[in-house]
Image: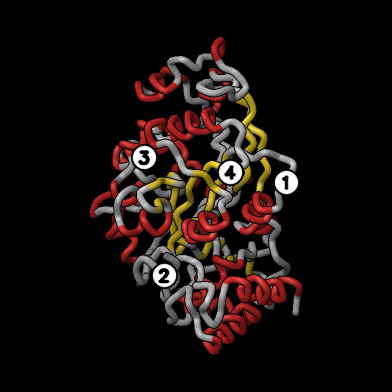
């Protein structure tokens, strides 16, 4: 389950996390008949605080800022008296840390990067989903429901534990009025970029991407390969003015001119920077990149499952999918949603929508986490990356 789905080649696309909060309110009448159906008995007058069979009340969300779709789901939340309480993460590892620790908050909705599925499933921190409560799952492409990828990352023994909703490819972002697009990731190590490389550090992303850059096949590295990866990452760290605290912080570094390019970036910051009057462009250097797919899941601590299922179902409406993708500068998981994207957003992932999702991921693979018994396991990834972050 932890092996890569396919080996990546080179892609020219985008990435995830955060969200430029759109000034968009989706009217309830505009969400389509499937949303109206799921909310037929859950109007404002009939909602409750998560009692069996009812929808409404508090939803405690643990995940990336923006994945709670505050603008796109505002009308649905309001009509059903749903109040989202967000606890936002800075790295994917925050999710299992909080859910496994038995935090005082009974988290209801969470999200995860596809590669964490086996870990979360084995830890028992996400719950099986009742697909009968998700009629809009019918819109989701079969790649995310019945393919070998689905069996690796979202479904186990025929039981669904997550619903993919956005995906992309890790990018190299840069200021086009300051530099030309880097031709290679290794170009970022040149003297001209000393102190000018932005980096929001994420162990999984950095170690996976570096393996691709160095011509390796993530995630099961040998010790000698891992040593090369760590050496490369230390060189990259020396190129930064200091790690960014988040992608929002990274955006601010670009806006201030403190950085002109980033490592292991996300194309969504091109959107985040627009209201600040800064143009950021994005590219995939010659060594290639890897893909991610983020999903919603129900935390095992949830005490408002009915509301979470209704919310996820509503968020799978193609109109909502398209609006969210345009805000996230990401991919959609539904062809009906792809047809509603603006040209700029659709063109980013034209291969997926014209040739199919499998074709897309043949060019930038989806990878899992290293096997526990591999000579370089997940614990070693985290331990060694922590040293890099601390300056060791």
Is disc 3 placed on a helix, strand or loop? Answer: loop
Disc 4 versus disc 2: nearer the observer: 4
Crowd around label 1: few <14 · some 14–19 · many ≥20 (10 Å): few
Crowd around label 3: few <14 · some 14–19 · many ≥20 (10 Å): many
Give whichever of 292, 194 is nearer the camera.
292
Residue at mark 3 to residue at mark 4: CA–CA distance = 34 Å
**Residue receiving disc 3:** 341
Check whether the beta carbons of the residues at disc 4 and disc 2 lie within 8 A of each other. no
Check whether the beta carbons of the residues at disc 3 and disc 4 lie within 8 A of each other. no
**Residue receiving disc 4:** 300
**Residue receiving disc 2:** 3
Quadrant where the N terminus is found in the figure:
bottom left
Crowd around label 2: few <14 · some 14–19 · many ≥20 (10 Å): some
Q: Position of residue 378 (x, y in %)?
A: 58, 71
Is disc 1 placed on a helix, strand or loop? Answer: loop
**Residue receiving disc 1:** 103
Q: Answer with mark 1 or mark 4, whichever residue precedes in sequence.
A: 1
Q: Is residue 79 above or below residue 12?
A: above
The answer, for residue 344, to whether it is visible in the render is: no
Q: Answer with mark 3 or mark 4, whichever residue precedes in sequence.
A: 4
Disc 1 versus disc 3: nearer the observer: 1
The answer, for residue 93, to whether it is visible in the render is: yes
Give whichever of 4, 285 is nearer the camera.
4
- Outermost residue toward the left in this view: 355
Residue at mark 4 to residue at mark 2: CA–CA distance = 26 Å
């Amino acid at each position: 389950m932890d092996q890569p789905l396919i080996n990546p080649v080179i892609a020219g696309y985008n990435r995830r996390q955060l969200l430029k909060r759109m000034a968009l309110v989706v009217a309830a009448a505009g969400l389509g008949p499937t949303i109206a159906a799921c909310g037929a008995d859950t109007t404002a007058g009939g909602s409750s605080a998560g009692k069996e069979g009812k929808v409404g009340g508090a939803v405690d969300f643990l995940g990336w800022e923006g994945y709670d779709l505050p603008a796109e789901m505002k009308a649905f939340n309001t009509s059903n008296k749903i109040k989202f309480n967000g606890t936002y993460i800075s790295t994917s590892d925050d999710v299992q840390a909080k859910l496994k620790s038995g935090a005082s908050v009974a988290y209801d909705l969470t999200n995860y990067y596809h590669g964490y599925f086996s870990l979360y499933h084995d830890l028992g921190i996400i719950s099986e989903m009742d697909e009968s409560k998700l009629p809009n799952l019918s819109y989701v492409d079969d790649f995310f429901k019945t393919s070998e990828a689905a069996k690796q990352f979202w479904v186990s023994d025929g039981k669904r534990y997550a619903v993919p909703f956005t995906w992309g490819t890790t990018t190299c972002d840069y200021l086009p009025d300051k530099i030309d697009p880097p031709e290679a990731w290794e170009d970022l190590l040149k003297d001209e970029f000393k102190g000018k490389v932005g980096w929001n550090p994420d162990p999984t992303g950095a170690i996976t991407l570096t393996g691709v850059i160095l011509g390796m096949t993530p995630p099961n590295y040998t010790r000698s390969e891992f040593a090369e990866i760590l050496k490369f990452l230390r060189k990259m760290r020396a190129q930064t003015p200091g790690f960014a605290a988040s992608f929002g912080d990274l955006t601010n570094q670009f806006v201030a001119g403190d950085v002109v390019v980033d490592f292991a970036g996300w194309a969504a910051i091109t959107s985040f920077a627009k209201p600040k009057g800064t143009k950021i462009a994005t590219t995939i250097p010659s060594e290639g990149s890897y893909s991610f797919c983020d999903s919603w899941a129900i935390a095992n601590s949830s005490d408002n499952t009915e509301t979470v299922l209704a919310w996820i179902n509503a968020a799978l409406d193609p109109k909502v999918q398209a609006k969210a993708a345009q805000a996230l500068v990401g991919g959609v998981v539904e062809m009906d949603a792809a047809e509603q994207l603006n040209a700029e957003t659709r063109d980013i992932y034209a291969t997926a929508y014209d040739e199919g999702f499998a074709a897309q991921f043949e060019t930038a693979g989806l990878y899992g986490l290293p096997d526990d018994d591999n000579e370089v396991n997940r614990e070693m990834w985290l331990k060694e990356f922590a040293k890099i972050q601390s300056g060791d």
